[in-house]
Amino acid sequence: MPTNTSLVVRRFEPTGTPTGPTVLLVHGFASDGHTDWIATGWPAALTATGRTVLVPDLPGHGSSPAAADTSPRGLVAALAKSVSGTGELDVIGYSLGARLAWELPGALPVRRLVLGGISPVEPFGAVDVAAVLDFASGGRLPADPLSAAIARMVTAPGRDPVALAACVAGLRQHPFSPAAGQLSVPTLFVGGAEDPICQGIEALAALVPGSELVLVPGDHGAALRGAAFRAAAAGFLDAP
C-alpha cells in the first residue's frame, strides 16, 4: 500500500510477470473499492489477464478519511497522489469514478481510459445538501426524489453521511462541464441500456475523437456487476 497518501489503496498482482500497464479502478459515489470492484470480481478477472490492479477508496468513502477539499480538483489530486510513481496506467472508472477519471490524464500518465455509468451532466447539481444532512441527523426524508435518494445512499450502513454530504457540496460547486478537446487518450464509454443516469452518453462520447461507445444490459447497478461490462473493458484495454 502506498505510504505517500492517506487514501486506502488495495493492490492485486498477477501470478506471473505483468503483461501491460497497471489498471486503476475508481469506484462510484457512496460506495467503495470493495463493493464496486472486488466483490464483483474485477481484480480477479484483470489479474488473470496479467495485469496488476489498484483499487483505492476515494476520500470520505470506505476506509479512506474525508478530505478538506471535496471539489473535483481536490478529489482528483488525492487520487493521483495515492498512486503516484506507479508508472503508465489504464484507468476504469464508474459513475463518480468515471467523472473523476475524465480529469485524470492531466494528473497521471494514463494510456487508456474506460468510463462507465457516466452522466454527461452534473448529477448532484440539484441536491439539497442541508436536507440530506438533516435526514442523516434524524430529520425527515427530503421531499424531492433526487435529494431523498442521496439521503438514503449516504445513510446506508457503514457510510459517513457528513463526509459524503461534503463530497456532494464540493461537486455541486464545480459542476461537470465536459467539452471537446479535454480528452485525447483512447477512451471507451460504457453505459447500461436501462440506466437513466447515462442518458445522453452518446453526446459525451462525441466530444472525444476516436472514442468507442458500448451499451450493456442493465440499469446503473446491474451494468457494473454484469459480465458484459468486464468483457468490453478487458477487450478495449488489451486491443492493439
Image (spheres, helix red, strand yellow):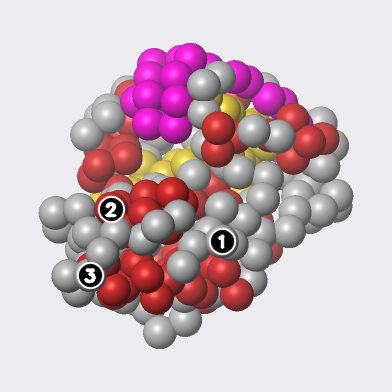
Spatial CA span between label 2 and label 1: 16 Å
Do callouts 2 and 1 mark residues in contact (Cβ within 8 Å)? Answer: no
Q: Does residue 39 appear left or right of residue 128 in this picture?
A: left
Name the quarter where the C terminus is drawn.
top right
Going by the numbered disc 3, the residue's amino acid type is: Gly
Spatial CA span between label 1 and label 3: 19 Å
Spatial CA span between label 3 and label 2: 12 Å
Count residues near mark 3 (Cα–Cα under 10 Å), then give few for <14, some for 14-19, many for 20+. Answer: few
Secondary structure found at label 3: loop
Q: Residue at x 74, y 40 (%)?
A: 204
Q: How many marks?
A: 3
Going by the numbered disc 1, the residue's amino acid type is: Ala
Residue toward you, 161 or 59: 161
Residue 148, numbered circle: none
- Image quadrant in which you'd find residue 111: top right
Residue 126, numbered circle: 1
Q: Does residue 167 appear left or right of residue 210 in this picture?
A: left
Going by the numbered disc 2, the residue's amino acid type is: Arg
Query: What residue does disc 2 label?
Result: 152
Magenta residue check for 127: no
Q: Is residue 200 above or below residue 182?
A: above
Magenta residue check for 231: yes
Q: Is residue 131 above or below residue 28?
A: below
Q: Residue at x 80, y 40 (%)?
A: 208
Residue 4 image point, x, y percent:
35, 76
Q: Which comes sooner in the sequence, label 2 or label 1?
A: 1
Residue toward you, 14 or 60: 60
Secondary structure found at label 1: loop
Residue 139, numbered circle: 3
Q: Residue at x 52, y 28 (%)?
A: 195
